[in-house]
Amino acid sequence: MMMRHLTRVTRRRLARLLAACLLLAGGLGAAGLLTAGPAGAAACSGAVPAGTSCTDTGTLVLTAGALTLTSPTALGWAGTLNGLDQQLVDPTSAHQSYLVNDATGSGAGWHVTVSATTFTSGANTLPNTGTLSTTGSITAIAAVTAPTAACSVSSACTLPTDTTTYPVAITTAVSSPTAVNIYDTSINTGLGSITIGIGANPVGWWLAIPSATKAGTYTSTFTLQITTAP
């Protein structure tokens, strides 16, 4: 009888001990879940105890800037009549490039246009058709190369994809001359600050001078513009 009583008491104590172990294990598991990594952390609000993580949200707001064109302030040519037809290019290096700054952040693309009035010296004029053209060369009026584009200093730009066909003929007119596209960029290119006409292929502004042209100082008004969209 005494032996059976001791066995029953031993079994009860073992059962209680196992139950206590299970409760302890369950408590440790729950604590582990409550102190899980950032994935289970709550949003940071007020004082957070040491050893407890919380999450914040970082937000960047970028406001669109402007699309601008910085072009030469003047163009100029000089030549001496010799009885032959001549092709003159503007020799001034400062005139052989222009700056496009696309800070819009839209990726809509852009294009540069130019128009010019008739070259006039008193009562004398140069022909409106076949006189003025532009290309990416200052050595060959018929060059088919585009002006070289390069990112400006401190600008990790997206270089433009130019689809303009060169040389570009620019027809002048006494009044209301037609604007002609001289450079463009496809959608999602041409973002940032970009110099057009720097490096191997500068912007060539060409004048064709017929042999019968009379001497004089001929002037024309140029209008350059940059517009959104290819």
Image (cartoon, grey):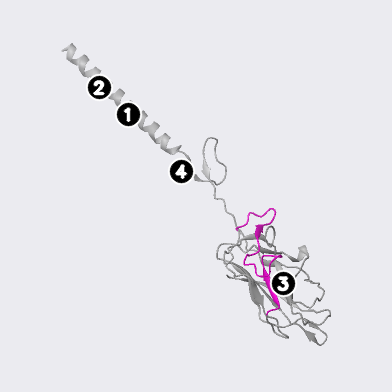
Q: Amino acid at mark 2?
A: Arg
Task: Count residues near mark 2 (Cα–Cα under 10 Å), then give few for <14, some for 14-19, many for 20+.
Answer: few
Q: Give the image quarter of residue 28.
A: top left
**Circle 4 or circle 1, nearest the eye:** 4
Alpha carbon distance from label 3 to label 1: 93 Å
Alpha carbon distance from label 4 to label 1: 27 Å
Alpha carbon distance from label 4 to label 3: 66 Å
Q: Give the image quarter of residue 139.
A: bottom right
Q: Position of residue 57 (x, y in %)?
A: 54, 50
On the image, numbered disc 3 is attached to which residue?
206
Among all residues in the image, which is located at the extreme front? 83
Q: Position of residue 103 (x, y in %)?
A: 64, 62
Quadrant position of the C terminus in the picture: bottom right
Q: Amino acid at mark 3?
A: Trp
Alpha carbon distance from label 2 to label 3: 108 Å
On the image, numbered disc 1 is attached to which residue?
22
Magenta range: 130-158
Alpha carbon distance from label 1 to label 2: 15 Å
Q: Position of residue 187 (x, y in %)?
A: 55, 65
On the image, numbered disc 4 is attached to which residue?
39
